[in-house]
Amino acid sequence: MLCLALMNAMTTGVLARRAGLTLKTVRAYADAGLIYSVGRTAAGHRLFEDEALWCVATIRGLRGLRGLGLTVAEIGSLGAAAHRGLRLADLLDAAAARTATRIVQLQDTLERIEAFRAENGAELAGEADFTGDPRRPGV
């Protein structure tokens, strides 16, 4: 006998349509533990209760935090309302540190590009040909 909860459950496709998401997004949320399935069909398809719609709406509301550099997993960790502000502050600190590191890396890349341009200006301007193989001097 099928549990009543499973009889009223919706498949991934139904949840995706009702929530206005793609199947891929629903599966990603489920795989990340952001929404929970209540079982599977005989064919192995995940089943979700109406609660999953609330979870998706919450995720969408928090998704704006991705623009602040937070990952989906970090946003998912904000699930519990208790101490959410303190947890968010910690996550924002981590995102800021990642961003600062990335800025340094990108600045280094820009400096290497400019150094290459300076060293190879004639070749880049078409005034000379690149000669030789830098891995084999004298060739």
Image (cartoon, helix red, strand yellow):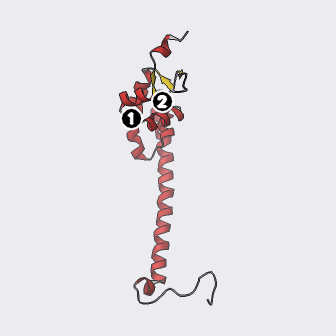
Q: Which residue is mark 1?
A: 21
Q: Residue at x 49, y 83 (%)?
A: 119
Q: How many tags in the picture?
A: 2
For the N terminus, the image quarter is top right
Position of 6 compared to 62: left or right?
Answer: right
Q: Residue at x 46, y 44 (%)?
A: 70
Percent position (x, y) of residue 24?
46, 38
Q: Which residue is mark 2?
A: 79
Q: Is residue 119 above or below residue 19?
A: below
Res 86 label: none
Categorize mark 2 by other alpha carbons within 10 Å: few (<14), some (14-19), many (20+): some
Upstream in sequence: badge 2 or badge 1: 1
Q: Is residue 100 above or below residue 115?
A: above
Percent position (x, y) of residue 41?
53, 22
Q: Which amino acid type corresponds to the residue marked 2 in the rendered image? A: Gly
- Looking at the picture, tell me which residue is in the foreground, 15 or 43: 43
Q: Quadrant of residue 20?
A: top left
